[in-house]
Amino acid sequence: MSTFVGWLNLDGGPASPEPLTRMMERVERFGPDGSGIWADGPAAIGHSRLCITPESLKETSPHVSRDGRLILAYDGRLDHREDLLAALGLPVSELRLPDPELLLKAYDKWGESCVDHLDGEFAFALWNRETRTLFCAKDPFGRRGFHYVADSRRFLFATDISALLAAPGVPRALEDRNLAKALGARTVQSDADSTFYQGIKRLLGGRTLSIKPGAPPHLRTYWQLSMEPEIRLGRSEEYAEALREMLECATRSALRTHHPVAAMLSGGLDSTGVACLAARELAARGQSLITVSNILPKEFQGEEWTRDESRFIQDTLNQYPNMEPHWALGLRYPVVSFDDEYFSWHDGPDRDTKSFRTRELFELAAARGARVTLGGSGGDMAPSFRGTGYPLQLARTGHWLNLITQIRLQARQRNMTAAGIFRREVVRPLVPAWLRNWNDRLRHGDRGRSEFPLLNPEFAVRLGLGPNSTSPHAPMRHEDFRKNQVELFNAVGGPGGAMWSRVHCPTMESPQPLLDPRIWSWCHRVPVGEFVRDGMPRSLYRRALQDVLPESVLKRTSKGWFAPDYQQRITNCRPAIEAFLEQHSRGNRVWDYVNRPLVEDTLARLSQPGSGEWWDNRFQLVLCNGMRIAHFISWIHRSADVHA
């Protein structure tokens, strides 16, 4: 995962490379394989390279076209390169070209419409010396970082916010509304492209930005997810065959590296499917696949929520002898840490509440020479969609016989009663939200809660959010699940997520084949019934990989817990949390934002018995996420005072 920075003087004056040197120092650890700065006229660009693919060894930093007309700062991996070559009219032998060279050829042919022909994960900034235009873009899913600051004098950009904070004149001022959202405010309105910092924006996925001296930035949306037109095939098997082909292609693209390849192997349907496809492809090449898996330490004393997945992992390893297993216990790092060193390289709080385990997995892979660790993120939202809302859809459209058959089949497959599925999938979504909440509180008490008001109520009042700002989201109607998902995706510019590997391991990339835009676009146009055929949730994915997955995983309907020992792990952090509370007394500025009484009450509950999802939810949201945000606010105020 390379990194880049840049500066464009909007008054047309010459740009100095000196500020870029300081900006690049903040992100140099992410690009250890070469760096450089280019400056001419009003533009200056810096680039640090991380070589992942064989072709990337030929890249330069930044990449300059042969005629010197175009200067490109690029971070990414282009997928389905054969299709791009065909569209460019180039022979297959040109596959040896590095990605930046192919991108420049695409720009030469199609101009700013070149992004319509690109697949993969990417973010780039391209300076055209002839037109004096800076053209920037991000892939449809927003998997790579691109942030910028624009005012009347200059346009600054970087893959990482930390680089922008190192630029002269960029304040370290918190954006209160986004902070309120992170703390649980549900009614706050903020721009989708805003960040935790005032004046710093992010380029959304599926968007381009063009700017030249003397003109404001021009933003364009070039890709959005759609559910139309619906795909209708002749036989059910054709859907599975089509998905299988796309899954194999996406996984093969993610394996384009000259380093050893690793994959997360959890024993769940999604990550196991990706790992098995990768193992099959690598076995054909005579190569092994490093697998990294979470297991529970022997001293774990769990109750009903253990959900250990080692049996499914072992079944997978038995089926694929070229898998090289490695195990993580999650003991190397604490759940919560208050070390300011983290913010020397990262620009916000760690939002992965399981990072004490995730980080160990990435480091296991890196220790064995891998720079690529495949994962299964995004599967349950597209290729392995559960078919949420299908029974209600049948009820609303009056297909009662089909509804009865579907519920009976699901009851058999999921080992549940038909009456229970009917209440949950049909009756409950039709009941008003207030009545559902009342019933949940009556039956479960506080255990019915899944959200907690981390936001200081006085902070909410200052923002004019009103008394219900921390109430739970309005429930998503089951029959509109995919429609709402598409609308949310398009509003926020994709799920993002690639930068999380950088948080844990600076030289690691984490491709997610199940987040391939071609797969998502296709799956969201497939009839929902294909995902629950014969009553089996995630049926389409299972049928597509029926000869790939181990039998135990293929028939599995349960879902494991990534960190079932979470309560014990967070309990070990109690002294550190208490120390932070003592160092930051009630009058500290941190508590102007964060609900300290809720933190204290939740901390007191750690000594009480209990396990299960509700307990884990509260500990994650309050003691992990809440305390990380509190630490971030403390660091921002202290660093702002230093830089003032």
Image (spheres, grey):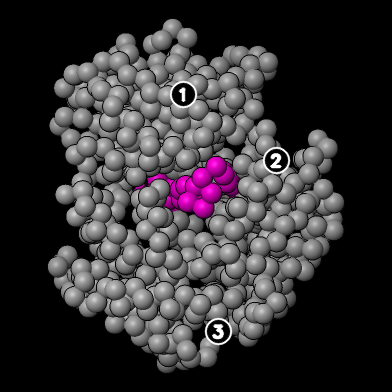
* CB atoms of marks 3 and 2 within 8 Å: no
Q: Position of residue 90 (x, y in %)?
A: 61, 14
Q: Disc 1 vs disc 3: which is toward the camera?
A: 1
Q: Nearer the viewer, residue 24 or 523?
A: 24
- Label at residue 160: none
Residue 533 x/y as whole percent: 69, 61
Residue that carries the numbered disc 3 in the rendered image: 611
Question: At x 34% / y 44%, what residue is drawn?
Answer: 161
* Secondary structure category for the residue under label 1: loop
Q: Amino acid at mark 2?
A: Pro
Q: In screen coordinates, is 613 left or right of 316?
A: left
Q: Amino acid at mark 3?
A: Ser
Helix, strand or loop at mark 2? loop
x 32%, y 67%: residue: 630
Residue range (magenta): 486-514
Mark 1 and mark 3 residues within 8 Å of each other at the beta carbon: no
| Left or right for 169, reference 127 | left
Report whether 184 appears left or right of 274. left
Mark 1, residue position: 61
- Please tell me which of labels 3 and 2 falls first in the chain: 2
Q: Earlier in the sequence, mark 2 or mark 1?
A: 1
Q: Is residue 273 above or below residue 598?
A: above
In the figure, 151 relative to 641: above or below? above
Q: Which mark is residue 260?
A: 2
In the image, 340 versus 182, the foreground residue is: 340
Percent of width and height locating residue 275: 71, 51
10 Å crowding of disc 1: few (<14), some (14-19), many (20+): many
Indicate which label's residue lies in the foreground, 3 or 2. 2
